Structure formats: C-alpha cells, structure tokens
Amino acid sequence: MLNPLRAAVYGGWLAGEVIRGALRIGADVVTPGLRMSPAIVELPLHCETDLEISTMASSITITPGTITVGIAPRTGHAPPTLYVHAIYGHDRDEVIAELRVMERHLLVMTRGRSGSDRAMEVEPS
C-alpha cells in the first residue's frame, strides 16, 4: 500500500521540478541564442511494477523539457525501458543522471528509503 505521506513528498518534489523546468525553458526562450539541443535517450529502469513504470513515464511527461515517447516492456533479463525526448539533450549522461534522481524519488515513494537504495544499487542493463 502506498504511504500517503511519501506520496505527498513526491508530489511536492515533482511540483518543484515542473516549476524548475518551466523557468529553464522560459529563460531560454527570452534570451538570445537558444541552448536547446533535442535528443532521445534510452533509460533502462529500476522500476518494476506497472504503477512505478507508468508513474515514472507520466512524471517525465509533465516535466517541461521532457516527454516519454516510448516504453519497452521487460523482456527476458532486459529491464523495462523508457525512451525520453529531452529538449536539452546535448549531454545524454546528464539527462540520464537527472532522470535517475527522479526515479530514486519515485522508488522512495513506492518502496521506502531502504527499498529504493536496494533497487538503485545496480545499474540495469
């Protein structure tokens, strides 16, 4: 069962990310010389349940500057994978690092701190 307090904390954190993304895009639009460099990145997930995967995809999509464009289900030993279009994708490793932060916050909400730490120990491949 989802802990309402952890869900509220995640919602507050996500609202902050939405505001941060909107401010970044707004600043880029009103200043000369766009810094946008769109890219699609592949993100193998630590998320396992349908709730975790769909919440992660939705969280990415509501955050300005990113949108989930595809979801590949778990196949064999391959983890579920999201394909994410990022407006600021010039550094793919940075985009993935920011998405991993989001995933960690999400897993804390669904599994608690210790469950999140265990899930994030090994990078999915």
Image (cartoon, rainbow, N blue to C red):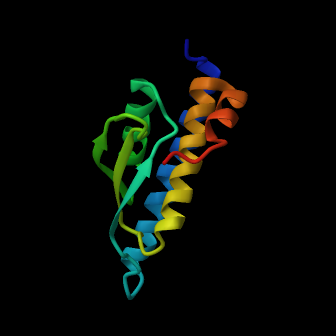
Which residue does the image show at 55% across and 17% down from the upper left? 2
Residue farthest to the front? 76
On the image, the x and y values in percent for residue 55 come to: 42, 33
Say above or below: 57 vs 89: above
User: From the viewer's perspective, is 108 left or right of 102?
Assistant: right
Q: Nearer the viewer, residue 31 or 59?
A: 59
Q: Nearer the viewer, residue 38 or 9?
A: 38
On the image, the x and y values in percent for residue 82 come to: 36, 46
User: From the viewer's perspective, is 27 left or right of 102?
Assistant: left
Residue farthest to the bottom? 32
Say above or below: 121 vs 37: above
Residue farthest to the right? 114
Q: Nearer the viewer, residue 48 or 61?
A: 48
User: From the viewer's perspective, is 77 left or right of 70?
Assistant: right
On the image, the x and y values in percent for residue 108 come to: 63, 32
Say above or below: 89 vs 31: above
Which quadrant holds residue 10? top right
Which residue does the image show at 59% across and 28% down from the upper left? 109
Residue farthest to the top? 1
| Number of marks | 0
On the image, the x and y values in percent for residue 23 come to: 48, 63
Quadrant position of the N terminus in the picture: top right
Which residue does the image show at 43% across and 59% down from the upper left? 22
Which residue does the image show at 57% across and 25% down from the upper left? 110
Which quadrant holds residue 42? bottom left
Which quadrant holds residue 90? bottom left
Q: Nearer the viewer, residue 47 or 110?
A: 47
